[in-house]
Amino acid sequence: MKVELENVKPKEIETRSFEIITRELGDKKLIPGTELIVKRCIHTSADFDYADNLCFSEGAVEKAIEAIKNGACIVTDTQMAKAGINKKALKKYGGEVYCFMSDEDVAQAAREQGCTRATACIDKAAALGKPVIFAIGNAPTALVRLYELIQEKKISPYLIIGVPVGFVNVVQSKEMIMDTEVPYIVAKGRKGGSNIAACICNALLYMIDNERDYWK
């Protein structure tokens, strides 16, 4: 069997990928201002369902970009997502990326309270005293705890990226976040993951630096 490969230079691979995504989306109408986020999720996962299941609260993208420009930090629920977020780009605006899942005090709090580490992580993040964007790609319990703290007026995130993947309380936890007044980007249904959480963060950062215009 003869296999024919495209002759694409390394630095052009991403551009070519976005050309394919745009072509295959065809006449699909995306919400203006969300195109890069949707297309990066498709690029990361090769799953075109994200063109339909990504939900954005009104003005969420604009509010998130403004928060990043003003030094907002990002808190995520996995080391994988933390590793995938472009920390150099975020640092230009004074922000940092945090993941508390491996912290001993979080593990101890989870044991004492009989909760997940993700829940304890959210409690620790609430005490940061910094403007925060949450990027949750794994643990629905993190979204549930965020919802509780929002209802108790103990936390007011600038954005919640709610894209945990799985089967137990995943759909419900996302719907809870969508029922708050906090800006959100949520992947409805069971799909998501740490890679999706990271790529949404990066899309927001790349929209600021405006170095990638091939997604338009």
Image (cartoon, rainbow, N blue to C red):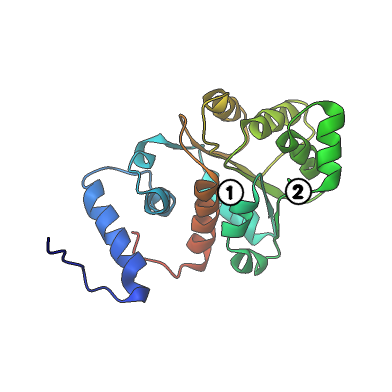
Element marked by disc 1: helix
Q: Which of the 4 image quarters holds residue 180? A: top right
* 47 up-or-down from 145: above or below: below
Is 20 situated left or right of 2 in this image? right
Element marked by disc 2: loop
Q: Residue at x 57, y 55 (%)?
A: 65
Q: Nearer the viewer, residue 73 or 5?
A: 5
Q: Which of the 4 image quarters holds residue 14? A: bottom left
Which residue is denoted by mark 1 in the rendering? 63
* 4 up-or-down from 103: above or below: below
> Disc number at residue 102?
2
List x then y, in percent, for residue 5: 20, 67
Q: Quadrant of the N terminus?
A: bottom left
Image marks 1 and 2: residues in contact by CB distance under 8 Å: no
CA distance separating discs 1 and 2: 30 Å
Is 157 situated left or right of 22 in this image? right
Amino acid type, label 2? Ser
> Disc number at residue 98?
none
List x then y, in percent, for residue 198: 55, 52
List x then y, in percent, for residue 85: 58, 58
* 200 up-or-down from 184: above or below: below
Q: Which of the 4 image quarters holds residue 13? A: bottom left
Q: Residue at x 42, y 53 (%)?
A: 44
How packed mark 1 is, by other alpha carbons closer than 10 Å (few <14, some 14-19, many 20 or more), is some
Q: Residue at x 55, y 29 (%)?
A: 174
How packed mark 2 is, by other alpha carbons closer than 10 Å (few <14, some 14-19, many 20 or more), is few
Which sits earlier in the primary sequence, circle 1 or circle 2? 1
Is 205 situated left or right of 44 in this image? right
Q: Nearer the viewer, residue 184 or 23?
A: 23
* 196 up-or-down from 53: above or below: below
Amino acid type, label 1? Lys
List x then y, in percent, for residue 33: 42, 51
